[in-house]
Image (tube, grey):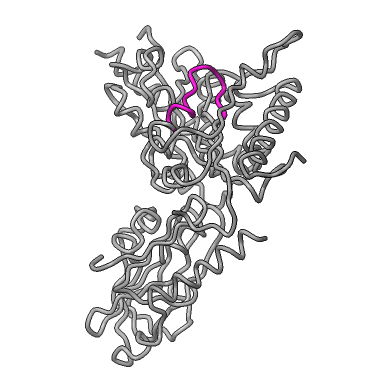
């Protein structure tokens, strides 16, 4: 992670949102690396879903459209389908998560990355994703709605 | 400062495997959280607190806490004071047991009916303290 | 070995895995290996209570944690156990895929099954420690 990290403290939970990333509404972060996009679950999303026990990403070579399932994440609470935030081809998946799925919880923006996608459109979709500030606002609203339930 | 739609109280129970009063502490906190004051209280995990859990310690620095200890070792109260600040209220289960007719409450693994009743009594005391700390009249 | 092996569960109150770790410690120390193990509470250990620290100092010990934050293992290492054998309910759960433990005050059926599995793995560690001690 480089650059500033925004924080939202809610109850006893602290959620972090690095400013150099973009975020989909479903809580997937994206880091643009030239023509490639590295993705993973945001800190907010991983804390909500609980301890990750298994991660099953799409295989390298798979072509994905925006919104297609890019991975299935099993936690002790739920099984979550992770929608792909950008269209392209999967070129790499994080093999370390097979032995150590807890990286998604312990280091969501670092060792917990899930897949790298070669993007189709030269970064236009990336530009349309939410900034850290906007996603923090969404996360706050979702946390408040849950607290009221 | 944690951002909350409303003020809440942090509850910290001892882990207490060595004596049944420790189990009473845990059970009482879960009772408050799940039934008596679900919107007003947050359970802070003492093991995580001790291991450096930043969320737990930050909450305890900014919001009032109630510690619930099984015995006079008062691990939860001491840990809270050491890492975040003096608890606003500290309950010790063995003190609530004092009085005539104290009977066995079961084991640390499994409370008997008297132990469960004691947990309910402790839970009511915690709920009452929660109301006081939130500036509410007794319910 | 005359002194019993200390077993320290994390007993986290926020997650069902903490309750699983706690119940597993009881199963181990009361049902599976009562003469060879003894539960030691984590909080007084970390807070430096002299009576509690003496139970652990210089002995091999077993930390039963719920999740990978490893609060019990960290506490035991800091308290002077000569060797910390780590068991995480999380890892045992991964070996028994499909179980969904729930509840903290009362574990569900999957939680109780997982507790038993964790305790059995811990009992195997006890056998190993005692075996090594007898060989020494």
Nearer the observer, A26 or C126: A26
Would residue B11 be counted in the magenta stretch? Answer: no
Q: Residue at 61% of width from left, 17% of height from top?
A: B94
Q: Position of residue C11 (x, y in %)?
A: 50, 33
Image quadrant occupied by the N terminus of chain B: bottom left
Asked whether, in this view, residue C36 is left or right of residue B135, the answer is left
Q: Residue at 64% of width from left, 48% of height from top?
A: B40
Residue C101 position (above or below residue A133): above
State which quadrant residue A128 falls in. Answer: bottom left
Image quadrant occupied by the C terminus of chain B: top right
Asked whether, in this view, residue C20 is left or right of residue B80, the answer is right
State which quadrant residue A122 falls in. Answer: bottom left
Residue C31 position (above or below residue C19): above
Residue B37 position (above or below residue B27): below
Nearer the observer, A68 or C125: A68
Asked whether, in this view, residue B84 is left or right of residue C19, the answer is left
Q: Position of residue A102 (x, y in %)?
A: 39, 53
Q: Which contiguous range is marked in magenta?
A: B68-80
Q: Residue at 35% of width from left, 9% of height from top?
A: C1
């Amino acid at each position: 992670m480089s650059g500033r990290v925004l924080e939202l403290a809610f109850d006893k939970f602290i959620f972090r949102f690095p400013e150099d990333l973009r975020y989909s509404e479903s809580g997937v972060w994206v880091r643009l690396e030239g023509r490639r996009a590295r993705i993973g679950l945001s800190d907010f999303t991983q804390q909500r879903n609980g301890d990750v026990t298994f991660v099953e990403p799409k295989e390298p070579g798979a072509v994905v459209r925006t919104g297609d399932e890019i991975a299935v994440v099993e936690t002790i609470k739920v099984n979550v389908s992770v929608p792909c935030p950008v269209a392209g081809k999967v070129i790499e998946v994080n093999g370390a998560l097979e032995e150590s799925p807890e990286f998604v919880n312990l280091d969501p923006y670092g060792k917990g990355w899930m897949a790298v996608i070669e993007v189709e459109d030269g970064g236009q979709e990336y530009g349309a994703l939410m900034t850290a500030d906007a996603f923090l606002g969404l996360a706050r609203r979702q946390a408040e709605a849950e607290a009221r339930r | 400062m944690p951002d909350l739609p409303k003020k809440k109280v942090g509850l910290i129970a001892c882990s207490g495997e060595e004596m049944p009063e420790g189990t009473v502490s845990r059970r009482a906190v879960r009772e408050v959280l799940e039934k008596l004051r679900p919107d007003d209280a947050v359970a802070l995990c003492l093991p995580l607190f001790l291991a450096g859990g930043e969320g737990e310690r930050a909450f305890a620095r900014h919001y009032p806490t109630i510690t619930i200890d099984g015995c006079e070792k008062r691990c939860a109260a001491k840990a809270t004071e050491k890492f975040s600040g003096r608890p606003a209220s500290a309950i010790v289960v063995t003190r609530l047991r004092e009085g005539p007719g104290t009977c066995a409450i079961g084991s640390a693994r499994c409370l008997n009916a008297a132990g469960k009743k004691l947990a309910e009594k402790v839970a009511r005391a915690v709920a009452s303290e929660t109301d006081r700390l939130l500036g509410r009249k007794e319910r | 070995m005359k002194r019993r092996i200390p077993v320290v569960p994390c007993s986290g109150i926020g997650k069902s895995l903490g309750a699983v770790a706690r119940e597993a410690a009881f199963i181990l120390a009361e049902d599976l290996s009562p003469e060879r193990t003894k539960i030691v509470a984590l909080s007084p250990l970390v807070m430096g209570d002299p009576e509690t620290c003496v139970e652990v100092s210089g002995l091999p010990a077993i930390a039963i944690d719920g999740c990978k934050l490893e609060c019990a293992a960290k506490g035991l290492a800091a308290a002077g156990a000569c060797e910390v054998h780590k068991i995480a309910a999380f890892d045992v759960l991964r070996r028994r895929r499909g179980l969904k433990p729930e509840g903290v005050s009362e574990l569900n059926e999957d939680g109780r099954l997982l507790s038993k599995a964790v305790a059995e793995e811990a009992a195997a560690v006890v056998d190993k420690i005692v075996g090594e001690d007898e060989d020494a």
